[in-house]
Structures are given as structure tokens and as C-alpha cells.
Amino acid sequence: MIKTDLLEKAKTSALLAAPVVMTAVPAITSYASEDASGGSDVMSTAVTALTTSLTDMATSIGGAIGSILPIVIPLVGVSLVVTIGIAVFKKIASKA
């Protein structure tokens, strides 16, 4: 009974996956043929746009981290001191 259910699920998955694959293959092939016949301008434009945007994003993230870090480090230090202080106090209080 379990094998039958598993077999039915496998058949259903294969039937659902087949149209997806059949739809994707012509799109990939047409993109490849366009690139081979001179569509490299589109590809180089896309690569340039992605490279530029990722570089800008990395610069922005670096700037944000640089401006937040001086605020966060003292806060983390204070919370660490309080946590360690509470642990030491509990240890001393339990011995007394």
C-alpha cells in the first residue's frame, strides 16, 4: 500500500515536471542562439549593470556598517559586562 502511494506520487510529479521542462528548454535554446548570433551586447550590458549595482550595494553596506559600528560596540560591551556581573553575583550569592 505504501509502495503504491509512493509510485502514484512519483507518477504525478513526473507528469507535472514534464511541461515545465518542455517550456524551459526552448527558452534556453533561443537565448543561446541569440547570444551566438550577436546577442552578446545584451549579455555584456546585463553583466555591466549587475556589476555596477552590486558594487554600489557593497559600498552602501560598508558605509552603513561603518556608521553603526561605533554605536553598537559600546552597547554590546555594556550588555556583556551586565551579563557577566549577574553571573558572578549569582555565583557569590549561592556560596553565602
Image (cartoon, helix red, strand yellow):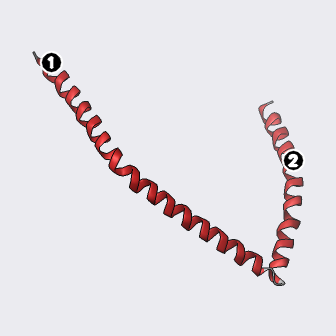
In the rendered image, residue 25, in percent from the top left (x then y), is placed at 85, 65
The quadrant the C terminus occupies is: top left
- Secondary structure under tag 1 reads helix
Question: Which quadrant holds residue 95?
Answer: top left
Does 61 sit left or right of 17 as displayed?
Answer: left
Q: Earlier in the sequence, mark 1 or mark 2?
A: 2
In percent of the image, x 77 and y 32: which residue is there? 2
Does 45 sit left or right of 24 as displayed?
Answer: left
Q: Which residue is mark 2?
A: 16
- Secondary structure under tag 2 reads helix
Give 88 or 17, whichever is nearer the viewer.
Answer: 88
Q: Which residue is mark 1?
A: 93
In the rendered image, residue 74, in percent from the top left (x then y), is placed at 28, 43
In percent of the image, x 50 and y 59: which residue is there? 60
**Classed neighbour count for the residue bearing mark 2: other residues with Cα under 10 Å, few (<14), some (14–19), many (≥20):** few
Furthest residue in direction top, as rendered: 96
Give 85 or 36, whichever is nearer the viewer.
Answer: 85
Give 25 or 10, whichever is nearer the viewer.
Answer: 25
Amino acid under disc 1: Ala
In percent of the image, x 71 and y 75: which residue is there? 45
Instruction: Determine whether 74 is above or below 93 in the image.
Output: below
Residue 77's label in the rendered image is none
Amino acid under disc 2: Leu
**Classed neighbour count for the residue bearing mark 1: other residues with Cα under 10 Å, few (<14), some (14–19), many (≥20):** few
